[in-house]
Amino acid sequence: MERTLIKNIAEKEGEKALIQGRVFNIRNLGNLVFLIIQDYTGTIQAVFDKETSVKIGDSVSLKGLVKKDERAKGGYEIKGEELEIVSNIIEDLPFDLAKNDLNLNLVTLLDNRPLALRHPKVQAIFKLYDILLKSYESVMRENDFIEIKTPKILGTATEGGANFFKVKYFEKEATLAQSPQLYKQIMVGVFERVFEIGSVFRAEPHFTTRHVNEYIGLDAEMGFVKDYTDITKTLNTVIKKMFEMIEKEGQEYLKEYDVIVPKVPEKIPYIKLSELKQIIKDDYGYEIPENTDIDPKGEELAGKYAKDTFGSDFLFVTHYPASGRPFYTMPDSENPEETLGFDLLFKGLEIATGGQRIHKYDELVANMKKKKIKPDGLEFYLDTFKYAIPPHGGWGMGSERIIKQLLNLENIKEAILFPRDVKRLTP
RNA sequence: GGAUCCGUAGCGAAAUUGGUUAUCGCGCCUCCCUGUCACGGAGGAGACUGCCGGUUCGAGCCCGGUCGGGUCCGCCA
């Protein structure tokens, strides 16, 4: 008999069906036993009138008559006839998967990740993440970007500094990519519009709920931009489409978290960093020191400001000071102390960073000198600019941060299957 | 890296000011139950309170050390 997926059970009404899945819960009422069976498409109740030796967690294959029954969740149930345990647990599960909420400490959740992922509410995060990745890919393609994959093992750190991982590479020392930055810029000179979904490695020893040492970046780079607003406008469109797709396709999973997908404005409000700092000080009484980026408390207030003033969960913060931005960032011609770099905040958390880049060779070399960055190992990148790269720019987005903010997760690690942090290298 | 907090059955928590046998819920085991859906009921097992040392008549609780972890800051997506 061919397997019937649980989501298709209605098609088999009145017939005998074969269901394969895992025993999610057992409710034993004596001479009436309910088994809740979970496969990758959903759960269904099977009724047996004899007690079996089956245990929660076992993988089973069962045959029975599919009946419509209002008393069962979902309206259908299976009158069980044959039950075969195809793989049995040899140890009791360490926590109760059958409860509505798993209610585990983060450490327990992550230490037991393969098991915890069997819980529908945990799975919902990754179903939504799947939609998110798909939506990014499709909206980028719609806008003529082509997908590229750039190397993650590099000879030179992308952006200098000490926050990269060193790896042994045969006789040489290599580093793991901190971002696809240099390669995506090079590719602007080839395809003009490119995007990448790829791993990013950061060796910073951070201990926060929004950082990990490996994450998936949603990058993009585009050529022939008029100025940085071409980039923010494109990102605005991309985010809007992504959220629309998540809302359309993710209802089943969103409701697990009681979440309403926020409306992305047609035009996400913009504000210069310097003005934002002033507003946070004047309106919210919180002072951020000069010459620094906004701190987490400031970001939270910026989110509040965007909501209060524009009714928006999103806010572009522009014109970051040159001192805090990487060497390839285009300075503002009206004020070289500031750059044409921006951040995108979602509910008070930075989810993307981007900007216009320097496209002229001489300016790039000069800026590197100014920032005291040696060109050693970066020749392949710099040389590209000798051959007329158009004005361009792009962004890098933290995919897991979007999910964290969307579902109001306490920790970004909940949105990563197998997160890597300072303390955690397994599972 | 700095600051701060926390380690109590498999899981999640409680334990008054230092006081006698460490409590509760879930799970587990045995029994009862033909419409449960976080099933219900009765009974039972399961903990050297992370580890080492100290103070005290007495330590889960106070002190020192050690190991493990969380959160915030810095940094960033």
Image (tube, coloured by chain):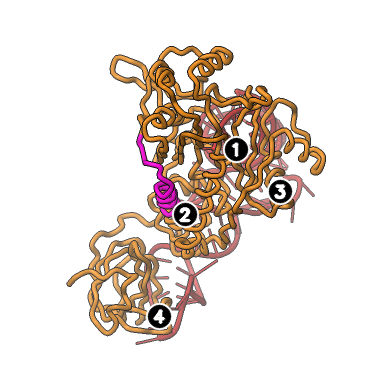
Chain colours: A orange, B red
Q: Secondary structure at mark 3?
A: helix
Q: Are marks 1 and 4 in contact (CB under 8 Å)?
A: no
The disc, 1 or 2, on the residue closer to the chain's N-terminal end is 2
Q: Position of residue A21 (x, y in %)?
A: 30, 64
Q: Position of residue A403 (x, y in %)?
A: 51, 50
Q: Which residues are magenta?
A: A129-149
Residue A116 visible from this viewpoint: no
Q: Which residue is mark 2?
A: A125
Q: Are marks 4 and 2 in contact (CB under 8 Å)?
A: no
The disc, 3 or 4, on the residue closer to the chain's N-terminal end is 4
Tag 3: amino acid: Lys
Point out the frontmost of discs 1 and 3. Answer: 1
Gap in Å between the C-alphas at discs 1 and 4?
Answer: 48 Å
- Residue at screen point 37% across, 57% down: A92
Indicate left or right for A421 with A86 as reference.
right
Image height of A217 relative to A55, above or below:
above
Tag 1: amino acid: Asp
Residue A75 marker: 4
On whether disc 1 and disc 3 are found on a single subunit, the reply is yes
Image height of A150 relative to A247, above or below:
above
- Residue at screen point 78% across, 36% down: A278
Residue A84 visible from this viewpoint: yes
Tag 2: amino acid: Ile
The disc, 4 or 2, on the residue closer to the chain's N-terminal end is 4
Indicate left or right for A202 with A299 as reference.
left
Gap in Å between the C-alphas at discs 4 and 2?
Answer: 26 Å
